[in-house]
Amino acid sequence: MQFQLSDALIEQVELFIELKNDKALRQLLEEFHYADIAEILDEVGLEDAMYVIKLLDSETTSDVLMELDEDNREKVLKNLSAKEIAEEIEELDTDDAADIIAELPENRQAEVISKIEDEDHKAEIEELLAYDEDTAGGLMAKELVKVYETWTVAGCLRRIRGQAQNVSRVHSIYVVDKEEKLVGRLSLKDLITAKSEQKIAELSNSNVDYVYVEEDVEDVAKIMQKYDLEAIPVVDQEKTLLGRITIDDIVDVIREEADKDYQLAAGISQDVEADDSILELTKARLPWLVLGLFGGLGSVFIMKGFEDIMATVPNLFFYTPLIAAMAGNVGVQSSAIIVQGLANDNVKGSLFNRLIKEVGLSLINGFALALLVILFGYFIGQDTTESVAIAVSMMSVIVVAALVGTFVPIILDKRGIDPAIATGPFITTSNDILGIYLFFIIAGQIIGF
């Protein structure tokens, strides 16, 4: 059942905690999904959150911990003993358990791992912790259903019952050879409809998608998106089956990448949230604000170099904000489309063809806007030569800004730099400066200055 969390509900939880009415609080929380409980704990104070966590059973607590806001989870973990954390971790899948432990300080990581009683679970968590968090190995879980190609259907059904108990959802059954190398996959439908004496090798589908353990998580996400996969096996270079990655983990990766790109586009250089400290927010925002400041000072310096033409044709001065805005907007539009295409792996063909297409598009847009500027000049009684000069120079600025907005993210991507950086202040500032410079140069030539 879905619940809409309200302030009244939060107040009710806080009241039960204040009254120490554990029975009523348990009954209330039993009606909620663990994600809703985590949302409640994110709203109450740390002391109340700890009270609720101590009240919940271990299985529910482990799920709630995974859903908590990262900052709140860090605070909660600090207030739990190594033994208590280990007990919760034993209820989690290996990938989630490894994520929790990775958030702890190194000295506590070893202490918590030492308290895990299930030796197999402990070994698998330690294996996952050895992988870089941005690789398939750092994202995969060890829980899966695996069968050998030499097994019969009857033997397979007996054996997979035990394996399935440790897997929350069986997306696929993976088939391996005697050396544990991935050789195929098996559908549940084929398994339960086959004859008992049939060999798994006869039913196995050798056409199975997989990723290597060192593969970047962004590449894994692209593969799973492209083929609409709910899960994908992870192998090493010898194709030994190591684990699997499920769609819920990929959704988290996609969301984190989207958040990062959005912040980069907005001129925020670090991963921050609204609740972070003033110092952290300042460190994330200030570098780009400084860039914008120097860009503005650059524009002032350029305009000072054209004092003579502005003294002769003062109308040009009043159009500089328009030119800067058009250059920035066009550049951001072009770069945003390219960055989105790069993220979805849709940018194909040569860079030259891409630039030619962008020139054509910007010429059409620039021509339409130039006509509007000339029309505006006519209605306000502006000199026709000046209107034409402003319109033509603006059209030129739009073409150049579009080329910069297209060219820069592609080059950044080829050099291994996140192209999302090109959709924010970087493009806006560079196009502002370049646009104003081109505006005065071209307008001056047409006016004959």
Image (cartoon, rainbow, N blue to C red):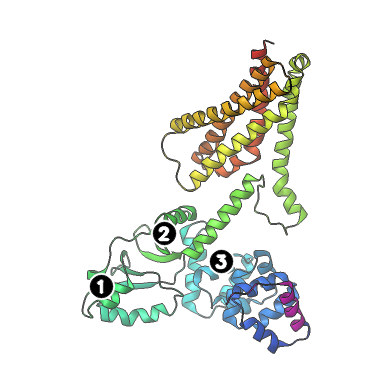
Frontmost of labels 2 and 1 is 2
Label 2–label 1 contact, CB within 8 A: no
Label 2 sits on residue: 228
In the depicted structure, whether residue 391 falls above or below residue 432: above
Q: Which residues are magenta?
A: 1-17
Q: Which one is in front, 125 or 311?
A: 311
Mark 3 residue type: Asp
Q: Give residue 401's position: percent from left, percent from top.
A: 59, 30
> Which of label 3 and label 1 is nearer to you?
1
Q: Position of residue 303 (x, y in %)?
A: 74, 22
Query: Label 2 sits on what residue type?
Result: Asp
Picture disc at residue 99: 3
Disc 1 is placed on an element classified as helix
- In the foreground, 215 or 108: 215
Q: Are marks 3 and 2 in contact (CB under 8 Å)?
A: no
**Does the magenta segment cover residue 69?**
no
Quadrant in the rendering for residue 27? bottom right
Q: Quadrant of residue 330?
A: top right
Amino acid identity at mark 1: Ile
- Which residue is tagged 1? 200
Q: Residues within 10 Å of mark 2 (few under 14, many from 20)?
A: few
Can you say whether 123 is above or below 407 in the image? below
